[in-house]
Amino acid sequence: MRRTVNCIAAAVAATSLVLLSYQAAADDVVFASDLPEEFTWDGAWADQAQPLPSGSMIRQAQATSRSNRGNANTGNRVASRSARSTRLPYMIGDQFSGGNGEMMMYADMGLDGHNVTPVSEIESPIFGGNRLNIAEANSTLPTDRLIFSYRHLSNAFESNIIGERAQTDIEHFVVGFEKTFLDGMGSVQFQVPLLRQLNSDLEVFQDSFGSNIPTSDRHGELGNLATTVKLLLIERQKFALGCGVAVTAPTADDGSIIGDFDTTFPLTGSPAVSATAPSSFFFEGYFDNHTVNLVPFLAWACQSDSGFFHQGFFQVDAPLNSSPARVLAAGTITPDTIYDAETFNVEVEGRVKQRTLLRANLGFGYWLHRGSRRDFLEGIAGLLEVHYTHALDDPNSLVVPLATFTDPSTTNDPFSLNINAGGPGGNVDIVNLSTGVVLDMGACQITNGVIVPISGNERYDRAFDFEYNLQVNRFF
């Protein structure tokens, strides 16, 4: 009996040694919790690579919380993953704002939808301005951290009030946290966006005494809260593959746009000759923020001994529902001396649907400096990222027909004047380039980045002129 027990014990010991050496060969790392109980180490090692008699390497990291210190087996695994993730910078990302929706009055010169002349346009944050990009201040690897991000977007909102144009900046703040579970293989992340941007409740007017430009009306508002669950599928010393899903809640403000015009109304592009006549009309638009967005994503990261690393996110941002909208308009418009004046009083209710967005975020970097964990500045890295956003469908806009104008002499073709509220039509292909520097100070990472659009000159392909980003990630 004793001989049998000894044989079983020897077999277990031999199997343990084989598995231990296999893990060291596969990952080039052995967690402290995988060592035999009789093996001891000096606590001063603390995540330093130390040689074992066999020539293998061990990376030991102290537990990052009191609960982990109480469980050496779990704590050392979580600490090792946490230490490794602090060596992978968080992506800068880009913010999709502006150029994504508006309330527009337009003239359909051909009555076929293919010859449209914008008369007045007001971009607004209520038309999907607070979309989530998973790559912003994020990494493939789950980590325990506090999150702060500040973004300045230059000229992200653009308005045209019957010929008078202006642009508005956005100040975008995010505070939140990420907490790991499943021994560091997964995490849940919660983000609260705070914005200073174009007011969601706008009033515009134009009369003989002047006009107001709504883009001068900025206001502090809460954005759409986001919760993200992330899970590692594969974890190796130099490669990680993960996936997850985010949900955004419609906590941002509802919106309204109210306009009152009592002035001449020259219609650019019409067959009019020289003169214009007085027009007097008003409109009111009310738009609720009821849309919930589901954002599944795939994430990956890899790094090399030479200091180069790569990471990326691939995501689909899908609205699960549309939001109620109501527009009413009344008044009289005389476009020019040829066409008859038209009096109208209309009210249309419907729903506005955001576009489904496909996003690819690719990041590349290099460690310019890598110190030890005893140094105040443990590392400096340079980042270069490419971000691509493509709309997979057309928005479900709310169309309000105001009037159809005719030439009594029938010399000129008739045309209609409509209001369109919602996202832009046509293709949306946005490419932004990000670059920045990361300071790794052990307990936190600080990132400074600049984002510039490199896609075409169309407004919907350039959401802003440039963007600045400051990130602080504090580990716990």
Image (tube, grey):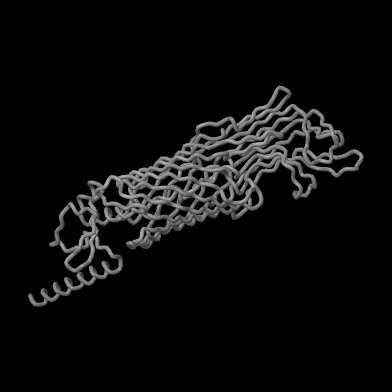
What residue is shown at x 36% (from left), y 58% (from top)? 307
Residue 299 in the image: above or below residue 207: below
Q: Position of residue 244 (x, y in %)?
A: 43, 55
Residue 86 locus on image (x, y percent): 33, 51
The quarter of the picture where the N terminus appears is bottom left
- Left/right placement of residue 58 relative to residue 210 reads left
Give the farthest residue toward the left.
2
Which of the two residues, 162 or 125, is positioned nearer the viewer here?
A: 162
Q: Find residue 209 and report its image quarter.
A: top right
182 shown above or below 407: below
- Residue 318 spot, x, y in % from top left: 54, 52
In the image, taking residue 153 as reference, residue 34 lies left or right, namely left
Q: Is residue 176 left or right of residue 167?
A: left
Q: Quadrant location of the C terminus? A: top left
Taking 218 as reference, is 65 left or right?
left
User: Residue most toward the right?
Assistant: 409
Q: Residue at x 78, y 37 (%)?
A: 267
